[in-house]
Image: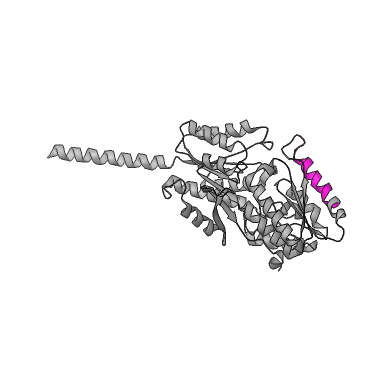
Amino acid sequence: MKKILCLLLALMMLMSMAACQKKEDSGNWKIAIMTGTVSQGEEEFRAAEKAVQTYGKEHVVTATYPDNFMSEMETTVSQLVSFASDPDVKAIVMCQAVPGAKAGFDKIREMGRDDILLIAGTPQEDPAVISAAADIVMYADEGAQGDTIMQTCADWGIDVFIHYSFPRHMAMELIVARHELLEKNAAALGIEMVDVTAPDPTAEAGLSASQQFILEDVPQQLAKYPGKKVAFFTTNCGMQPSLQAACLDEPNAYYPQPCCPSPYHAFPATLGLELAIGGDDTEALKQISSKLNEHDAVGRFSTWASPVAMTIIEIGAEYAKAYIDGTVTSRNDSEQLVRMFNNKIEGAKVSTYTDVNGNTFDNYYTILLAPVNFAEYLS
């Protein structure tokens, strides 16, 4: 009898030690977040900082990819591999998923790190490529914006639509899809659409050359169409401040939205506002509308009511944490992901992406919000 009791006590002690060990191990987790620098994408950078505040610096590690990521792809890949070299890293969220994301994700799998959840936000590699490498991909619905942007232009009575981009972006599948729909809608509405090639900010001359080009070209374009309403759009994040500044005090210049729609995308810098990026979105929209009103520009600017890039990182981190905890048991749980988006942004339309050939990627999600009428936010 004593032997049995001793055995039971020993078993209980072992179970207790195992439980304690399991609890201790469950605390050794990390989510790695990779974003651009402040100059390339401040919103993503701040979203990563916010994740550190939410989950603690012991659980969130961050890094940035190079501004000139096209020529420094190996640096991006090396940083992703460095994340995976830490056994405590259980998930990686990369936004924007610039070229190098797929190569980095593939190397992580080659390392035997099949346990790491890989999330790509705002990818710059084709859907078939990045969806095969990542567990989840999230992107603003570029294609559908071909409808929403042109509808905003129609509401404004736009005569000419200027589209700034460059070959690298115009080789990206979703940007091309948006462009084609913009062309189709412009033709149907009787709006003249003009393509203008701008310098690629990742080229040797850098972002400053691209920004200067926009500042100089907008007045030239307006001079070509005297008395007409001209809308301007660019596919690049770094060009947004210049484009907003160039349009702000020109009564015939219109700005339907940033490439990554958000209240914080260039607006604070353009308007001289001290906005808490990722703070109260409604308050931010009120402050923006007030400043726009000072320039008689309330009816010439629009965006989305919530920051899509920041939300992708926030939802990515939330989903990763739930996956680590075991609350989410699938690498790609669409119901949970959609629920998280709906809890964060009212009215968000989340869909899986289907390409022109009818191929649907069940782990590639697109997000669409309605455009903002800044006049509704004037006090």
- Looking at the image, which is closer to me, 118 or 188? 188
Pinpoint residue 232: horizontal percent, then vertical percent.
76, 54
Is residue 205 in the magenta section?
Answer: yes
Tell me, yes or no, if residue 54 can be seen here.
no
Q: Quadrant of residue 28?
A: top left
Q: Quadrant of the N terminus?
A: top left
Residue pushed farthest left? 1
121 relative to 9 in the view: left or right: right
Pinpoint residue 310: horizontal percent, then vertical percent.
60, 50
Pinpoint residue 69: horizontal percent, then vertical percent.
66, 36
The magenta span reads 203-219
Total marks in image: 0
In the rendered view, would you say 177 is above or below 109? Answer: below
In the rendered view, would you say 290 is above or below 356? Answer: below
Q: Quadrant of the C terminus?
A: bottom right
The structure residue drawn at horizontal position 63% and vertical position 45%, both measured from the top left corner, is 173
189 relative to 355 in the view: left or right: right
The structure residue drawn at horizontal position 79% and vertical position 60%, both measured from the top left corner, is 159
Q: Mainly helix, strand or loop, the magenta region? A: helix
Is residue 191 in the magenta section?
Answer: no
The structure residue drawn at horizontal position 75% and vertical position 38%, both measured from the top left corner, is 206
